[in-house]
Each structure stands twice: as C-alpha cells, then as structure tokens.
Amino acid sequence: MADKQITLNRLSKRYHGAKTDSLHGVSLEVAAGEVYGFLGANGAGKSTTIRTLLNFIEPTSGSARICGLDIVKDSVEVKRHVGYLAGEVALYSRMTGKDFLNYMAGLQPVKTKGYTAELVKRFQADPTKPLGNLSKGNRQKFGLIQAVMHEPDVLILDEPTSGLDPLMQEEFYKLIRESKQRGASVFVSSHNFAEVQRMCDRIGFIREGRLVAEQTLADLAAKAAHTFTLTFADSAPLAELKRLARASITAHDEHHLTISVEGELSPLFRLLGAHHVTRLEQQDVNLEEEFMRFYQKGNA
Amino acid sequence: MGIFTTELKARKWSAVRWTIGIGAFIALIFAIYPSFRDSSAQLDKSLQNIPDAACNLFTDTSDFLSPVGYLSSQCYYLLVPLLFSFLAIGLGSSLLAREEQNKTLELLLARPVSRTRLLLSKAAAGTSILLIVGLVTAVLGAILCNLVGFPGVKALGVFYVTIMCLDFALLFGALSFTLTAMGRFGRGAAIGISTLLALASYIFSSLDKTVHWLLWPVRVLPFHYYHPADMLRSGTLSGYEAAGMLAVSVVLLLLAIAVFRRRDIE
C-alpha cells in the first residue's frame, strides 16, 4: 500500500456519562489516492469516528493520524490537509453562497485561483441567493464545494450525495475521481450501497463501534455469494438445486429460478449440465446483501 | 473575511438598533429634566414619604431632585446598566452557542482555526459591539449634559459613568459566554443564570445600607463597586473598580478558553 494518509490506531470513544464505548479500538488505514467506504447502520459509530478524526470530540483512548499528524495534538495543522462535509449540512442561512464561500476561503485559502468559481459552475450552484432560501440539494452543493475548494489531501465526507440529483451525483463522482488522481485520500461514510460500490476501493463495516470487516471491492466480489438467474427449457429442477450445499434459491417459477451460491461453483454447473439450460445470467455483487450478511453474522 | 469581521457584519443592524434604543432613552431622560426641575417642589413632598430602603433601589444618592440625583435615579443607577447588561448577556450567550446549536461551529472547526482563536475572535466581536454601542451613547450623554445643563454634573462624569456601565455589563456578558463555552449550559440557561446574578448583584448591593448583614457579602458583587452619583459629580472614573471588573471579565474569558479547548462539541 502507498503512503498512509489516515491511520487509526485502536481508537476508542466513550461519551461523558455513557456506560459503554461508542467506538471500540478501531484501527484502520487509508492510503494516498484511495477511496475508503465506511459502512454501518445508524448508531454504529460512523459519525463518532468522523467527529473524532476532526477533533470535534476527543478520543478516550488510542490515537489517529492524518497526513502523519496527530489528530489531537496537531489538530489545527491537520485541518490544513482536510476537507470535510457533515452528514447534515449546516450552513449560514442568511449568507449568500458567494459570501459563505468567501468566508470559508478566508479561513482556509484556496490553492488554485478560479477553482471555486469552476466548482460553482460545475455544480450549477447559485451563489447569489441566501443559503436559507435554497433547497436541500442546492445547499448540499455548497457543502461539497466548501469541502473540496482548497483541494485537500484528505477528504472526509459523511453521506456526500444526500439530496443531489443524478446529474449532480455524476459530477460528484467525477470530482472524487479527480481528487483520487491527484493523490487525495477519501474517507466516505454512506448508506447508499450503489454509491459506495461505485466509488470506493475498499470498504470497512462498522457494527456497535467495532470494525467488523474490511475488504477491497475486488475481494468482496470474489468472496461474495454469486447470484445467477437461470432459465430452463423444461421445468426448473428445484428439488435437486435445493440439495446443493451453500446455495439458496431466492425466487422461482415453472421455468425460471434465481440462486445464490457461496464458494465453489462446480457442483452447481455439474448439476446444470444434466438439464437443458437456455439462459444463464450472473448478477453483480450485491453490497447490500454482503452488508446484511455481516450484520446477521454479528447478531447470531 | 475572518470570524471577527463576519460576526460584526452579521450583527451590525442589531448594534444599530441597540444604539438607537439606548441613545433615545438617554435623550428622553435628559430632555425631560427641565420639566422635572420645575415641578421639584411638588415632588419633594411625595418623595419624603418613600422609605430609605425603597430609595436605595433607585439611586445611590439621597437627593432625588438634584441634577445628580435625577440622572442617577432615572438613568445611570439602574436602567442604563441593566440595558447594557441585557445586550451583553444576549451577545455572550449567542456568540458561540448559536453556532453550536446550528451545527455551523463544525464548519469553522473543520478549518485550520484553533479553538482559542475562534473563542477570542468571537469575544472580540462581542466586546467591539458593546464598545460601539457604549461609546456612542457615552458621547451622546456627555453632549446632552452640556446642552441641557445640569448644575453640578460634569459632562466627563456622564461619559465615565457610561463606560463603567459597559464594564459592569461586560462582566455579565463574559459570564454568559463562559457558561456556553463550558458546554453544560444551553443558551437559555446561560441567559437565565447571568441575568439572575446581575439582578441579584444590583438588589443586594442596593440594600446593603438597610440590611446590615449584607455589608460584607456584597463586596464580592460587582454592583457594590458602581457609584454613578460620585462619578457624575467628580467627572472621574473609579479606576480600581473599573480595572477590577475588567480583570474578572478577563479571568472568565481565560476560563472559557481553558474549558472550550478540551471539551467535546455537541
């Protein structure tokens, strides 16, 4: 792996008055130019991790570094390298978009002159209206622009495309690709599986404050249950297929059948060889199913 | 644009409204003095029946009808310090708490801005607004004093007494600011506690001449060190008292910084 831009070392957080940790010794690393997806249910610890990384809250134990700098001791210096978008974008409702971006640029100067104006144009944001008069999606655009306009080395994004229309989502994915190309690390928390699947190189699953699994998208695809939709000329051999180990039939009718198989595929194809299969279609890796699998395993 | 200038810009109309409001009140009190003076013989009879304890709540001089007594009782003993205190407490309780409540504080802290710098910028903006309102009304009072003519009252005394009111208000503004910086108190609680302490300070200090056991405890209250009648007469500022109150405000600000630097943002 290339240079680690984000490193969490057994990071824990217990809120004042709480009986248990909200974050239990989370350790992970994100390399330069890597997009890391952070998945978890509500209350799993995603926002606590992000808020700790930004030193809005202090870790109870453990440590974390961003661009080699300690997130607590070098908090101000860390922020020079970071762009942040909160899950619920809160902006100054009386300010116009232009005033808001000027204010943010005053606190953290932009590197490339004209880049902010380019972003405003790309996201079709209206900088003349007060932010309080804008729709959620349009406010989100300004939230995104302020997070990326200084071309940070590390982007920390919480539900970044919330409220954006499909065209603007495309523009956002393009922006992430550009950030990745210039070597920026992206740490993105999301509930949108399709988005994570599309954007991320690696995914971490967090459950009850613990990082329960970490996988690259390629590994996930290799290990994931393979789902096939089969069409038979004759009746589908339902009984035989049900007997297959580590396979489950999720839908079927007279001639069609959808089956998910974990691991070795040879038994399935040996069985299919004995039947007249007219069509076989493989479905994409379903990240949502994988996510549910991790959670069900944890609950078991 | 920095935090300080943005805060000033956001609150400019509020500052204008407060300046006009307090300025208009002072102008009115000064303007009606000639009518008050003309009916002083009648008023004298009525005032003789008021108990001393009640008189002490409105002025720090026994002579209501003198120019000094009039300005103290009608303007500078209670109402102007109270108005400045309301402004200061309102500012102190909202400068930081509103940002935290609206979640915009995260926008600022996600930038390379230290918590100390953030707090100092906010405090400087609040103090500047208080100073602008105070200085304009202090100068206005001094000018009106000369125009209307108050025998025995020095224009510089009117100016200084307003500055002392500011100092007093600043202390309670700093208190509400510190309470919000500590994070345990919401905006409403900070306003409530600060206002209660400001009022208690005024009431207990006013009663110390009547309730003798209060004589020592009131020494810890800022209002005890506020004597507008003396300042109006002498035209001098009580330097030690003013410096003492300012020092307490600075200590409160340092406490706010110390706590805010390490606490979790809600």
Image: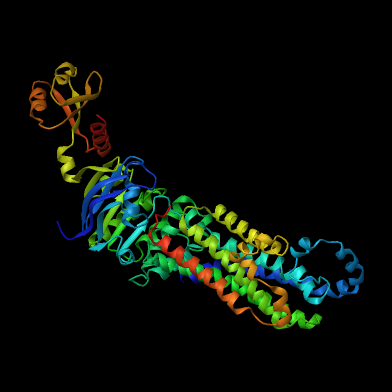
A244 relative position to A191: left or right: left
> B1 or A218, which is in the foreground?
B1
Q: Can residue B166 be seen in this view?
A: yes
Residue drawn 24% across and 18% down?
Answer: A254
Residue drawn 20% across and 25% down?
Answer: A248
Position above or below: A247 against A99 = above
Total marks in image: 0
Q: In the rendered image, which quarter contains the N terminus of chain A?
A: bottom left
> B42 or A226, which is in the foreground?
B42
Which corner quadrant of the image does residue B221 belong to? bottom right
Residue farthest to the front?
B213
Which corner quadrant of the image does residue B25 belong to? bottom right
Which corner quadrant of the image does residue A71 belong to? bottom left
B36 relative position to A201: left or right: right
Residue A226 appears at what percent x and percent y?
17, 33
Residue A103 appears at what percent x and percent y?
45, 67
Position above or below: A224 against B230 = above
Residue B56 appears at what percent x and percent y?
75, 64
Q: Can residue B13 be seen in this view?
A: no
Residue farthest to the right?
B42
Residue drawn 12% across and 32% down?
Answer: A263
Residue drawn 60% across and 72% down?
Answer: B167
Colouring rule applied to residues = rainbow
Residue A143 appears at what percent x and percent y?
41, 57
